Amino acid sequence: MHAFDVLGDPVRRRILELLAGGELSSGAVSEVVQQEFGISQPAVSQHLKVLRDNGFASVRAQGTRRLYAVRADALEEIDAWLNQFRRFWNQRFDALSTEIARGKRERRLREEEKPQND
């Protein structure tokens, strides 16, 4: 399955967002996802399996619990693909930085022109 097919599902994206905060048990993930999306625990388990099978999540056993974590290497494929487009938004960020600096400069000049009340 292609990375964007895996991440095209909002439930799987949400699971990754949760895991980005640190390792979580399958029960903790299920609790949040079931509440937010109204899906069953077996459905959440299936989404976790898709993430695991496609390299986006790792799992380790701790007693009877299964702890899930994000696998950053799978995200590198997406990052590499997005890299070809970064120049488009970097230009916009540069323009935004210029406008912010211009606004700060104009405010500073206006403040300097105001008469001082002493």
Image (cartoon, rainbow, N blue to C red):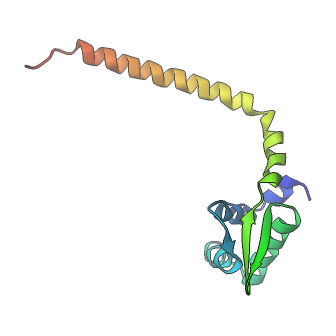
Residue at the image point whose x is 90% and y is 55% from the top: 2
Residue at the image point whose x is 71% and y is 77% from the top: 26
**Residue that sits furthest to the bottom in the current view:** 64
Q: Compared with residue 112, is residue 38 higher up or lower down, i.e. above or below?
A: below
In which quadrant of the rendered view does residue 30 lie?
bottom right
Q: Is residue 74 left or right of residue 107?
A: right
In which quadrant of the rendered view does residue 33 lie?
bottom right
**Residue that sits furthest to the top in the current view:** 113
Q: Compared with residue 92, is residue 30 higher up or lower down, i.e. above or below?
A: below
The image position of residue 86, as x and y in percent, is 73, 32
**Residue that sits furthest to the front in the current view:** 63
Quadrant into which the N terminus falls: bottom right
Residue at the image point whose x is 26% and y is 19% from the top: 111
**Residue that sits furthest to the right in the current view:** 1
Q: As rendered, which of 31 and 8 lies closer to the eye? A: 31
The image position of residue 112, as x and y in percent, is 26, 14
Quadrant into which the C terminus falls: top left
The image position of residue 95, as x and y in percent, is 58, 23
The image position of residue 6, as x and y in percent, is 83, 60
Q: As rendered, which of 51 and 63 lies closer to the eye? A: 63
Residue at the image point whose x is 72% and y is 66% from the top: 69
| Number of numbered labels in the structure image | 0
Q: As rendered, which of 49 and 38 lies closer to the eye? A: 49
Q: Compared with residue 12, is residue 99 higher up or lower down, i.e. above or below?
A: above
